[in-house]
Image (spheres, helix red, strand yellow):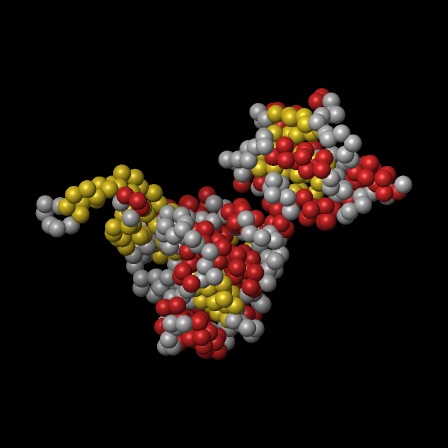
Amino acid sequence: MKSLNEIESKNILVIGDVMLDTYFTGDVKRISPEAPVPVFRKKKERSVLGGAANVVANLIAADQNVSIMTMVGNDKNGSRLKDIFKEQGVDTTLVITLNRTTTEKTRFLASNNQQVLRLDVEDTYPLGHEDCEKMLHILDEQIDKFDLILLSDYLKGLLTFEFTQGVLQRAIAKNIPTIIDVKDMNVSKYKHAYLIKPNLKELHDLTGLNVENDNEIIVASRKLKEMCHTKYILTTCGARGMVLVGDDEPYFIESVGKEVFDVTGAGDTTIAYLAACMVNGFEMRDAANIANYAAGIQVAKVGTSSVYWKEIREYLMRKENATVHKILIGKAIDTFRKDNEDKKIVFTNGCFDILHVGHIRYMQEAAKFGDILVIGLNSDASVRRLKGSERPINNQNDRAEMLSAMEFVDYVIVFDEDTPYGLIKKIHPDVLVKGGDYNPDNVVGRDIVEASGGELKLLPFVEGKSTTNIINKIKM
């Protein structure tokens, strides 16, 4: 699998029905004397992005550049949604305001986050022809900048047949992949999408076929694939996981959600991370696997919420053969301190050319000073400048993989400079660890760490254990 640390920010356009998800938190302790209904006493209230807007929120969490194309009402909630989008850095130039009610779903959560009632306020009448033409014209002006288009259909009136097909035809003409989270029973509306994501009920409704067992799901998926002239069908099956059907053999993905508190927004999380992986060049099966991991993390949270790469990376690092996800590059380094602001970060660095017991004991002790141990690893070019043309013995990829295989090492970052000063400045560790033979006044990066309230720790080396000694012994 391609490393999550290779994820870059791509331009993704989300087109779909947005809504505001509002949560009233309180308790129910008595029945009303006026009627045999529970009395809900509200204590707290919060509102978050819902529907297609939740897809946007998850794409932002996945470090993508997101634009939203939608319609909102000329009301308080419409303005609120646009304000939230702008606060999160979402491009809203494709949002139109119409004389309608912006969808708001209000959920009443009692003790243990038990949902006792949901109140929906909305208009669902379809987008008119003139407004459709207006939106497609606006899309024509900006479509060239997008790497992928994601349609999230909640049947709230935006994605009419005319508008949906208008978008798909334009995407095909520009060779831009489109993926759709479907709701409508009108199969022809979704024709020519690159990928369609139904759940089991939607798969049944769209094809009219039974979907009770694995074989029936495959048959129905293949039929839908043919009906829509699409490349892939990814069916979400709840606790059973997902099924990916394309030109190859069907691929079954087992659900990873062990603790399920709330399935609200799980489909949004799934398609957002599928999109983020697809647009970054992941193989389709790997993209579906990561989307499945994201959904498993999401259902363990309460209410509509976002999932972050950090959470997926930590999940993968608990799996076997996932050492590649410990090696940080690019954007993962830039956001590392922010992603781990609640953790005590320990940093040390070195060439670690031929690993020996001295290295192991040193790193084990360093790991005890905090929650996360990050190893800065000199690149091959850096090692040659420091130790001569015959070094390193092992190349930087091998050295990074060996370090990553150790349980007490959380992350490895290869740096090309002679010193790790720039790297330390980026990740701002809480504890800087070096060998006991260093003069504290000469330790690179000490000023950065101590300026932020951190500290320097010096550890003694194991006598007689060094890479140079090993090399000399081999030469004898």
Q: Residue at x 35, y 57 (%)?
A: 98
Q: Nearer the viewer, residue 266 or 323?
A: 323
Q: Judge whether 281 appears above or below 394 on screen.
A: below
**Extreme-left residue of the structure:** 34
Task: Using the rendered image of the protein, determine whether residue 66 is visible from the camera's viewpoint.
Answer: yes
- Does 84 sit above or below residue 462? below
Q: Is residue 86 left or right of residue 114?
A: right
* Residue displayed at 57% across by 25% down: 453
For the point 72% across and 46% down, the residue is 399
Q: Residue furthest right?
A: 476
Pick the residue in front: 427 or 157. 427
- The residue drawn where x is 45% and y is 75% is 215
Can I make out residue 93 in this image?
Answer: no
Quarter of the picture holding the C terminus: top right
Residue 457: x percent and y percent? 64, 26
Q: Count the marks: how many?
A: 0
Report the side of 221 relative to 323 (left or right). Answer: left
In the picture, measured across the screen, residue 436 lies left or right of residue 4, that is right
Q: Nearer the viewer, residue 172 or 132?
A: 172
Please state, as top left, top right, bottom left or bottom right, where the N terminus lies in the image: bottom right
Q: Please provide percent x and percent y for residue 253.
A: 49, 63
x, y percent for residue 434: 69, 29
Q: Is residue 463 above or below residue 190?
A: above
Give coordinates of residue 185: x percent, y percent: 37, 72
